[in-house]
Image: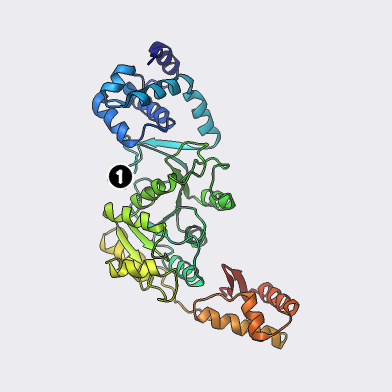
Amino acid sequence: MKKLNQDKFRDKFTNLNNTTFKEKERLAALGFNNFFKIGTKSIALLLNYFGSINQAYYSDFEDLKRAGIKENIVYDFLKFRQEFSLEKILTRLEKNKINFVYLEEDSYPKLLKEIYDPPFLLYYQGEINFDNNKGLAIIGSRKHSAYGEKVVNYLLNYISGSELVIISGLAYGIDSLAHNEALKNNLATIAVLGTGLEENDIYPQKNLKLAREILTQGGALISEFPPGTKALKQNFPLRNRIISGLSQAILVIEAKEKSGSSITIKQALDQGREVMAIPGNIFSEFSGGTNKLIVDGAKLIRNGDDVLEFFISQNLIDDKANKYLNKKSLTKKRCVIKFENEEERLIYSLIKKANERMENIKLEEISEITKLDTAIINSTLSILEIKSLIKNGYNGYNLSEL
C-alpha cells in the first residue's frame, strides 16, 4: 500500500499551543477517539508498544503495524489523520461547552476505570464530580406500567437528601422518569448517552428539554462518542456498560423477561456491582424480568430503606445523616374533594380504584363502564385535570399527587 507523508502530519499537530506531555496525550486520545476503527483494545496495544498515546498517534505505517494494528486499519488511520483537524474539533467542543477526560488522566472516574473495558475517552457537559462514589443506576422498560411510574416517584422522593447520584440513559420510559424525579427531588442526576453531546445528537430528540434541565440543575451528560455521532443501534449496549460502571448499584424498576435492560444487568454483574430489583405483579408483562432477577439472587427492594441500607452498609452514606433524613410515607393525606356533579364523582371513583390496583385506566374503559357520552367524559376528565385531581399519564389516567 502507498505510504503517506509522516512529516506533514507531525508538523500539522505540533503547531497546537499545547506543549505539556499530559496535554499532548489528551489531544492524541481525542484524535484517536474520532477515528472509529480503533477502540479501547487497540488503544491498549498502542500504549503497551509505544508507552505514549501521543507517540502512537504520530507513528508511521510500519511502527503502527508492529504495535499490532491490522494493515488495512493502519492505512485508513493515516488517511484519516491527513484530513482530521484537532483545531476544529477543539473549537467545536468549546462552542458546545463539552469537556473530555482521557483514561490515563488522574481525573478519570475511578469506578469506571475498574471495569474490563473502560472507554479510553469520555466527553461530558455540566457539573460532575468524578470522585463521587454514590451512584445509583435506575433502569427499566421504555414502556412501563402505572405501577412502575409510581415506584420511581415514591423511591426518589424517599431518598431525596441522601446525596445519591441517579444515573440513567435518557431513554423513553423508566430512564426519563428517573431523571425527571431526581430533578424534582433535588438529587444530582447523570445521563449517559449512546450519541454525541451536541443538541442535534440527543436521542430521543423529545428528551432534549430534559437534557437541558439536567444541565441547568447541576447534573451532567456523558458520552464516549464524539460530537456529531447519531443514534446508532450498536452504540447503546456500549453506553450501558458506562451506566453500570459509574454506579455502585443498579436498580431495575420494570423489565420484560427478554428486555434490553438485561444487557446492562449482565454488565453490572460482570463489573461486580450490586443488582437490585422491584418485585411486580405476576400477571404483568413488565414484571417478568424483575421477578426472575430476584429469583436469581438480585436484592429485593421493598421500600426506600432497602436502597439506602445498601449504601450505608458500604459506608458510602452516613446512617444518622441520611437514613432518616427524608423518611416519607407511601400514603399521603388528601384534601377533601368537592365534586360539581355526579359525573365527576363517578369518573374520579373509577380512576381511584385503578390507582389502588397500581394501574391506569383508559378513556375507552371509562366509556364502557359508565356508558356516558364521550363528550361528557372528555369534558369531565378535563375539569378533573384542571382541579389537579387526576393526570393523563402513560397508557391512561391516574390520580395526581396532592
The picture places residue 43, in percent across and down from the top left corner, at 32, 32
Taking 370 as reference, is 124 left or right?
Answer: left
Of 251 and 162, nearer the camera is 251
Taking 307 as reference, is 140 left or right?
Answer: right
Question: In the rendered picture of this protein, how many numbered marks are placed on residues?
Answer: 1
In the image as oriented, which residue stretches furthest toward the front?
1
Q: Residue at x 39, y 11 (%)?
A: 7
Above or below 166: residue 200: above
Task: Classify the position of the C terminus by image quarter.
Answer: bottom right
The local secondary structure at tag 1 comes to: helix
Q: Does any portion of residue 17 appear in the rendered image?
A: no
Above or below 129: residue 174: below
The picture places residue 36, in percent across and down from the top left corner, at 42, 33
Of 38 and 110, nearer the camera is 38
Taking 309 as reference, is 87 left or right?
Answer: right
Q: Label 1 belongs to which residue?
A: 110
Taking 205 as reference, is 301 left or right?
Answer: left
The picture places residue 82, in percent across and down from the top left corner, at 45, 19
Q: Does any portion of residue 77 appear in the rendered image?
A: yes
Task: Classify the position of the N terminus by image quarter.
Answer: top left
The picture places residue 63, in percent across and down from the top left corner, at 29, 19
In the image as oriented, which residue stretches furthest toward the bottom?
342
Above or below 316: residue 226: above
Of 191 and 316, nearer the camera is 191
Q: Amino acid at mark 1?
A: Lys
